[in-house]
């Protein structure tokens, strides 16, 4: 059992939870995730480890409550318990000294981006962070990212904060400016956003890493649930990823797989 130490709301339907997990906290690296079950028999939910405090033996999880299982997890109050927290899973982010990097987060993807961006900054990279969302309440972690970013650019679809429009508008300006052009781009967010970023950087030949979040079941490479096509080959996000070369990902098949489960999730939502 894993005790929930705090549970606060960062944005509509987005919670930040600190959980006691003394074996995971010292072992985790940026980019890795855990699989959480609220109670025995529940759906297994993959969640990025947003932060960790090895001395305190705690990890920080960001949870978007969009389905029946995630809503059940975020309903656990401080002092309550999660049945299973398995991890750390997945490959850690490949942290290199690229020089200038652009770290791009969309919506809750910003929470996944956070540990990657910080690790890149700690390696000595000059990090420009671009974060986007539907509207101001969906812009998260801007102050935390500003602590180590050279600059933080914000975009919202309705113009309520920062530039009106999408993250790609900010990225395009960087790519076209020799003084700001990144040597590598990291993007985490909705699939259409990651796809748009990868298509934008492709003609510039800029290395682009995306973090995929397909359906996961066992998290061990056995069930095949998280299969994605990369460079024409089947890969498993849970053991081969979750980060992949954005220019090699087959985003069309990924979109098809994600929509396959929508009806089932809707039935679960109506049942609770
Ligand atoms: Fe089962 Fe990845 S979650 S193979």
Image (cartoon, helix red, strand yellow):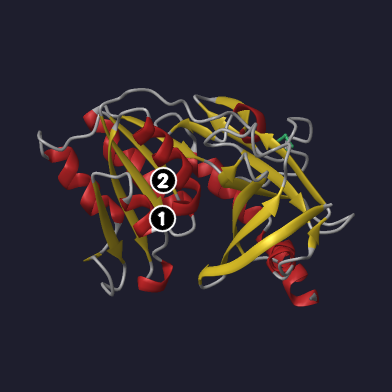
Task: Pick the residue in front: 245 or 160.
Answer: 160
Q: CA distance from mark 2 to mark 1?
A: 9 Å
Q: Is residue 178 left or right of residue 37?
A: left
On screen, residue 179 above or below 41: above
Look at 52% across and 36% down and name the residue there: 30
- Toward which corner of the image does residue 23 lie, by quadrant? top right
Look at 20% across and 45% down and name the residue there: 172
**Residue 182 appears in view:** yes
The local crowd at label 2, few if under 14, some if 14 to 19, many if 20 or more residues have their Cα within 10 Å, is: many
- Toward which corner of the image does residue 55 lie, by quadrant? top right
Where in the image, quadrant-wise, is ligand 1 located?
Answer: top right
Q: Nearer the viewer, mark 2 or mark 1?
A: 1
Mark 2 or mark 1: name the one nearer the start of the chain.
Answer: 1
Residue highlighted by disc 2: 194
Query: Cβ of disc 2 within 8 Å of ligand 1?
Result: no
Q: Quadrant of the C terminus?
A: bottom right
Q: Assign a secondary structure to mark 2.
A: helix
Residue highlighted by disc 1: 106
């Amino acid at each position: 059992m894993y005790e929930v130490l705090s549970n606060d709301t960062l944005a509509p339907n987005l919670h930040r939870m600190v959980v006691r997990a003394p074996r995971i906290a010292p072992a985790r690296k940026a980019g890795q995730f855990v699989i959480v079950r609220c109670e025995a028999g529940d759906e297994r939910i993959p969640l990025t480890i947003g932060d960790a405090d090895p001395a305190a033996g705690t990890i920080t999880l960001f949870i978007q409550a969009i389905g029946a299982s995630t809503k059940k997890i975020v309903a656990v109050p401080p002092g309550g318990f999660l049945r299973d927290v398995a991890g750390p899973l997945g490959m850690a982010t490949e942290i290199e000294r690229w020089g200038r990097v652009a770290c791009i987060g969309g919506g809750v993807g910003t929470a996944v981006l956070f540990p990657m961006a910080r690790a890149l900054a700690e390696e000595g990279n000059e990090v420009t962070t671009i974060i986007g969302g539907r509207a101001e309440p969906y812009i998260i972690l801007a102050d935390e990212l500003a602590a180590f970013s050279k600059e933080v650019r914000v975009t919202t679809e309705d113009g309520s904060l920062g530039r009106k429009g999408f993250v790609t508008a900010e990225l395009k300006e960087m790519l076209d400016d020799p003084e700001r052009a990144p040597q590598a781009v990291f993007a985490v967010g909705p699939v259409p956003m990651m796809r748009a970023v990868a298509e934008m950087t492709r003609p510039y030949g800029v290395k682009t890493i995306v973090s995929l979040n397909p359906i996961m079941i066992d998290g061990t490479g056995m069930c095949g649930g998280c299969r994605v096509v990369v460079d024409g080959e089947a890969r498993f996000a849970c053991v081969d990823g979750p980060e992949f070369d954005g220019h090699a990902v087959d985003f069309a098949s990924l979109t098809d797989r994600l929509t396959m489960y929508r009806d089932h999730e809707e039935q679960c939502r109506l049942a609770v």
